[in-house]
Structure formats: C-alpha cells, structure tokens
Image (cartoon, rainbow, N blue to C red):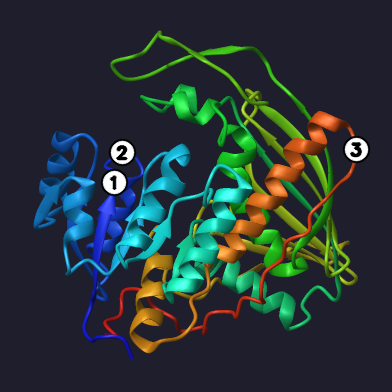
C-alpha cells in the first residue's frame, strides 16, 4: 500500500486538451488536482482558476510540490520525453498524453527509468478503458463473433487546421494523422489481436502548407512536415490482419470506424477516440444487432484514475507505458514502411492488459 486517500495530481500543460482533462479529473474523487503548470504562467493561472484548482505555477514549482504524486503531462509531443523524465526524476508517477514520446529511444528510456525507480508510467489513449471498447472486448472474449480474423479501421477528415486555433504541432514530426490519431486505433486493435508484428504502408500529402481556419490566427499558413495520408496493412501476434487509413486530406469525413470480422460475425466498435458509443454485431443476412454498452463513460483522465488506484494498492494499471511504447514502435514502423515501400518488422510487445470489471466506475470514491 502506498499512502492513503485521493492521489495528488499536478497537470503540466494548459493547452486545448487540458480543458477535458481538468473538467473530468476535478470530478473524479480518487484524484486531488492540486496545481496546473505551464511555460506560460498566465495560461496556467487561467486554467487553474477556471477549473477550481488551488494553485498554478512553473514546472519547477509543480515538481517540487511534495503533495503531487502523479504528474499528468499534457505538453506537445516534442516535449513529452523531457517533461516526463523530469517528473520521474522528481519521484513522481507520470501519465503522458499520446504519443508517449516522439522517438523510440526516448520512449524506451522512459519505460526503463520508471521501472528502475519503481514508479508507474502511463500514457493515453485511455479511451480503450471506456465502456464502449470494454464492452466490445468482453463480447469478443465471450465468443460473440467466433475467432477474430481481420479488421478495418478508417479515420479521415479535412484536418485539424480547420478547427484548432494553434494546429502547427499537428503537422510536424510526431504528429500528422498517423501519430495524432493512430494511437487510438492501434491501441483498440491490440486489445483483440495482440502486438503488431509487421506493417506495410504508403503515405502522401495534399501539400506543404495548410491555412488555419479559426481563432486569432485564422488565414495564417503553417508548414506541413509529415504525410497527411497514410494507408497501412498490419499483421498481429495473435494471427489477425488489419487495414487502416489515417488521413487529414479528405473533405468526406469518416472517423471512428473499427470493424472486426470473426469466423461467425463482424462487430462494429464505437469510435476509439471516444469512451462510449454504439456496438453492433452483424451476422450477415439480417439486421445488425445493437448491443447495450455497460459502464460509466468518465472521459479523458480515467487512465489516471486507474493509475491512482494502482498507486494506492501497489498493483498494475492498464494503460501502461510499455503498451504505449509498442504502439509508438508500430507507428514508427508504419512511417518507415511508407518511406521504404516495404514491410517493416515490429519487435516490441507488451504484457496482456486485463479487462476492467464490468462495474468499474471512475466517478466512485474508492481511496
């Protein structure tokens, strides 16, 4: 047992994604959000005041706070490794936004550092812990579609420059549709088929710049440094095969599509970027059956709740750094395959992730 009561949380990064995290985590009684930090002190102060967090300040102040046990790192992908390493060095457990880091070496170093220090390292996405994908997992494990064989995943729309006021980082190394949205889809698929073993991919781009469509910078052109269309074919350890499309180049929006075909039926999962949704099972020749989703949605931050409970119990959490490292490895292999025009092997793996109990509730006070 490590301590008692709610786990003290410090949030680093006061950008757009912090809105969802702070709103949710302030409502989870097993988390005690104590401070928000950012390189921009005014931004940290505004978010702390908006969400009723007692303090704001610098990263150094947050890391020096003995009441902060778990750091939720919401910085841009390029800063994930440095910030997370500093937090681990200060003796804090860490929850990272996705991807865990921008490169494999720094991700491996983070996992090794956390293990050596006896600290928990977790990473988004935690959407696979939501009732939508957990219901899908329970159905598949109960044999609802027979043996899982293949899957299809699609995420395509016109791009985040249309809606994000500061989308620059989403078109730079460590982002693009593959690294921005791939973690949701590959994490979801890994829960059925296990680790990715190899990938073949192609990539393209609609141009070298995009124009911001909203906010004070509307009309400003930004650089595009990564493929904005990636199509991939994945082999998995459990024998499954999946095809996936990740695109910021399509005026036709088709997102959240994950279909898993088994020997007896196909299951249509909810959007892996959401925590709940509709689950359908189609056996062919009849109307698909809609399956009720059971559980509490919770939203972004439920992975931190699962970590907090593991911190207190001395157990394992589910959205682990090693799982996130494998997903990063698979995405880097996807990018490498698109450049080389050949299959690329993925050597990493992860330990099996236990399913959540059907009655798991992030809004329940357990600590």
Q: Secondary structure at mark 2?
A: loop
Mark before the other along the chain sequence, 3 or 2: 2
Count of marks overlaid on the render = 3
The C terminus: image quadrant: bottom left
**Mark number for residue 19?**
1
Position of residue 367 relative to residue 247, above or below, is below
Helix, strand, or loop for circle 3?
Answer: loop
Whether label 3 touches label 2, CB < 8 Å: no
> CA separation, marks 1 and 3?
41 Å
Badge 1: residue crowd in 10 Å (few <14, some 14–19, many ≥20)? some
Q: Quadrant of residue 89?
A: bottom left
Let me know if residue 37 appears in the view. Answer: yes
Mark toward the viewer: 1 or 3: 3
The residue that label 2 is drawn on is: 15
> In x, y percent, where is residue 214?
37, 19
Q: Give the residue at x 73% y 75%.
A: 140
Which residue shows up at 89% across the image and 43% down it? 343
Indicate left or right for 97 with 352 as reference: left
| Disc number placed over residue 342 in the picture, else none | 3
Residue 347 location, quadrant: bottom right
Q: Position of residue 20 (x, y in %)?
A: 33, 50
Left or right side of 231 for 353: left
């Amino acid at each position: 047992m490590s301590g008692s009561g709610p786990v003290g949380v410090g949030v680093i990064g006061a950008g757009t994604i912090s809105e969802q995290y702070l709103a949710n985590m302030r409502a989870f009684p097993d988390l005690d959000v104590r401070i928000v930090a950012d390189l921009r002190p005014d931004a940290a102060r505004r978010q702390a005041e908006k969400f009723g967090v007692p303090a704001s300040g610098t990263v150094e102040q947050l890391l020096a706070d003995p009441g902060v046990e778990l750091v939720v790192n919401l910085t841009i992908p390029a800063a994930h490794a440095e910030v997370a390493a500093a937090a681990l060095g200060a003796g804090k457990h860490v929850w990272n936004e996705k991807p865990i880091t921008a490169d494999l070496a720094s991700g491996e170093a983070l996992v090794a550092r956390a293990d050596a220090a006896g600290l928990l390292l977790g990473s988004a996405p935690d959407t696979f812990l939501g009732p939508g994908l957990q219901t899908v997992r329970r159905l598949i494990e109960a044999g609802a579609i027979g043996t899982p064989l293949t899957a299809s995943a699609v995420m395509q729309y016109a791009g985040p420059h249309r809606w994000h006021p500061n989308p620059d980082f989403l078109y730079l190394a460590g982002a693009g549709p593959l690294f921005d949205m791939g973690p949701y889809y590959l994490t979801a698929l890994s829960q059925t088929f296990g680790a990715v073993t190899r990938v073949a991919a192609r990539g393209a781009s609609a141009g070298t710049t995009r124009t911001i469509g909203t906010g004070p910078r509307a009309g400003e052109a930004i650089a595009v440094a990564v493929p904005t269309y990636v199509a991939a074919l994945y082999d998995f350890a459990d024998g499954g095969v999946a095809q996936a499309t990740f695109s910021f180049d399509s005026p036709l929006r088709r997102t959240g599509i994950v279909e898993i075909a088994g020997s007896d039926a196909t299951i249509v999962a909810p959007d892996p970027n959401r925590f709940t949704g509709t689950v359908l099972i189609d056996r062919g020749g009849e109307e698909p059956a809609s399956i009720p989703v059971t559980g509490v949605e919770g939203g972004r931050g439920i992975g931190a709740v699962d970590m907090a409970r593991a911190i207190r119990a001395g157990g394992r959490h589910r959205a682990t750094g090693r799982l996130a490292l494998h997903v990063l490895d698979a995405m880097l292999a996807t990018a490498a395959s698109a450049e080389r025009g050949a299959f690329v092997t993925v050597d990493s793996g992860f330990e099996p992730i236990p399913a959540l109990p059907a009655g798991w509730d992030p809004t329940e006070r357990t600590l």
